[in-house]
Image: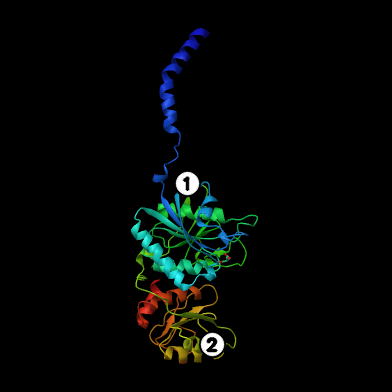
Amino acid sequence: MRARLARRLFVLTFLLSPWSAHAAVQARPQPAAASEMPRVRLIATGGTISNKVGGRLTADELVALMPDVTRWAHPETEQFANLASGELTLGQWLALSKRIAALLDQDRDLAGVVVTSGTDTLEELAYFLDLSVRSDRPIIVAGSMRNPSTLGYEGAANLQDAFRVAAAPEARGRGVLVVLNDEINAAREVTKTDALRLNTFQSRAYGILGVVDADRVVFYRDVVKRHTAKSEFELAPVATLPRVDVLMVYQGAPGDLIKAAVDQGARGIVMATAGAGATSGTQDEGIAYATGKGVFVVITTRTGSGRIAARVRTGGPRGTSSAARSEYQIAGEDLAPIKARILLMLALTKTQDPTDIQRMFTEY
Ligand code: GLU
């Protein structure tokens, strides 16, 4: 009885073995060839993520920190600069935007681009790219709060998350994305809210666009404003960006700073007003001086969120005195002062028409 059972089991095993072996080979996940992986290009500009004591990490060294990245993407590298974010000039911003646009145009198979940046002005660079690179392929801006010489350096994790988002088909058409701390935020909405904490990048009232979790990249919503592929801004013919300054409203603030900016060549001024458009001190005189000379004054709020409504028929945005109102006074809608400054710089590369500029502030 036992012998017969053993013989049957032997025959069964013999019959099944070629099939089982074949099935096992079939089922085992094969590492995908590098050529099958979405190619993602890292363009490194510097920042804390690369600011190692004793010498900054290069783009190649940053990629080497992510041994697992080839599970999601085939990385390529390009060193654009290796500076703190605030050290990049507006000329370098222009060059970076043009470089990314040219790269995406020439390399049709490139899945996406990751840009590393210092975190201090990261949100400004991200919004500049959001408005100026006309492509629906993912452009991800990433950085870190701790440097590579610090315990708990989170740069490699943030960078790998950025590569994963850049390689994800779901990230297409969502504008420039900021990825840090496992979260995806929109360039238009995100701001650095804390000088030191790892969860510093927040979109306040708007919230995150998505998350980068262990299993997959998840999106929850879209930005409905115009950006990237739907942007009208074309930088190819632009050699320099016009000067636009940001000035804050505070109690008793002197308007002569606004006059000084105009006299120094500002083509636009963004006022970070109190509440929903209130000025103080002699600032209305400064605003009238600016608009009288055809310098655009964009009204935004210093509160961190909320909207400055475009004027209904005559007069400036609500809150400003009638003396200061002019067609050159533009309502900044819900853009943060530093984001409004970027939109105004780009707007002025295209038009000097107040109605057109106000339209841009409602569409972007
Ligand atoms: N936190 C700095 C920045 O935003 C980075 C410092 C550095 O890279 O030297 O760029």
In the picture shown, does residue 53 fall above or below 18? below
Q: Residue furthest right?
A: 151
Q: Residue at x 47, y 75 (%)?
A: 307
Please identify the quadrant where the C terminus is shown.
bottom left
Q: Position of residue 16 (x, y in %)?
A: 42, 20
User: Can you identify the residue that label 2 sits on?
Assistant: 257
Please tell me whether mark 2 sits on a helix, a strand or a loop.
Answer: helix
In the picture shown, does residue 361 fall above or below 41? below
Which of these two is toward me, 255 or 133? Answer: 133
Q: Position of residue 283 (x, y in %)?
A: 53, 89
User: Can you identify the residue that label 1 sits on?
Assistant: 70
Q: Residue at x 49, y 72 (%)?
A: 89
How many numbered discs, if any?
2
Residue 26 occupies quadrant? top left
Mark 2 burial class by Cα count in 10 Å: few <14, some 14-19, many 20+:
some
Question: On the picture, is 275 further left or further right than 169?
Answer: right
**Of marks 1 and 2, which one's residue comes earlier in the chain?**
1
Give the amino acid type for the residue marked by disc 1 in the picture: Thr
Give the amino acid type for the residue marked by disc 2 in the picture: Leu
Q: Residue at x 43, y 64 (%)?
A: 223
Cα distance in 3D space between marks 1 and 2: 53 Å
